[in-house]
Image: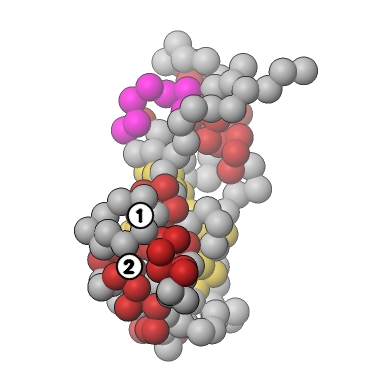
Amino acid sequence: METSVPAEMLETAESFYGQHGPQGTPLAELAAQGLEIPPAALVLRHWHGQQGRVRPFLPTATDLAAPPVPVRVYRGMWIVDCPTCRGAQVAASGDHRLLCVDCFNADIGGRWRRVTWPADAPAIERVLLARPDPDTRNWTGEPVAQLQAENAERGLPPQVGV
Ligand SMILES: [Zn+2]
């Protein structure tokens, strides 16, 4: 069986903030200086960081008692909503934690909050990427079959890579 890799992906914190932004120091250069930024902190680096100096104020602990918050897809981006202040930010696919750029998780002592990703995230991506208009790439927990049915209603293929 032949499988093909989609040329395009939904945006994540890694793709969106890991490549560009006003804080221009390449991540590899920061890492070489011992200022490695974890993927979940890339949003903070973008909004609050002064080059690598965002590193010292990152939390050292995760609040395991706080309920995890789920990701969703909004206009082609995996995002996570802060349950406290309702701010939303791009989620990191390789680092399932949230530190809100607006309230800094003050309600849980500034610790990391856990983020849950769906087990079928790659399948969700393949279905949404079949939609040419990025504004229609949205997901808030629907089953993959439902997303595929929505594609069919619009005359689109069920997913990319088929
Ligand atoms: Zn917040």
Mark 1: amino acid: Tyr
Q: Would residue 61 appear left or right of 90 to someone viewing this image?
A: right
Asked which secondary structure carries label 2, the reply is helix
Which residue is at 26% across, 55% downward?
21
Which residue is at 53% across, 35% downward?
125
Which of these two is toward me, 110 or 3? 3
User: Dots 1 and 2: beta carbons under 8 Å?
Assistant: yes
Question: Where residue 26 appears, x then y in whole percent?
Answer: 36, 58
Q: Is residue 133 magenta?
A: yes
Is residue 105 in sight in this rendering? no
Q: Is residue 97 magenta?
A: no
**Residue 4 found in image quarter:** top right
The residue where tag 2 is placed is 45
**Residue 25 found in image quarter:** bottom left
Q: Would residue 128 appear left or right of 17 to someone viewing this image?
A: right
Question: Where residue 47 appears, x then y in whole percent?
Answer: 25, 66
* Crowdedness near tag 2: few (<14), some (14–19) or many (≥20) residues, C-alpha within 10 Å: many
Q: Which mark is residue 17?
A: 1
Which residue is at 34% across, 73% downward?
52
Is residue 46 in sight in this rendering? yes
- The span picked out in magenta is 129-135
Quadrant, the C terminus: top right
Mark 2: amino acid: Arg
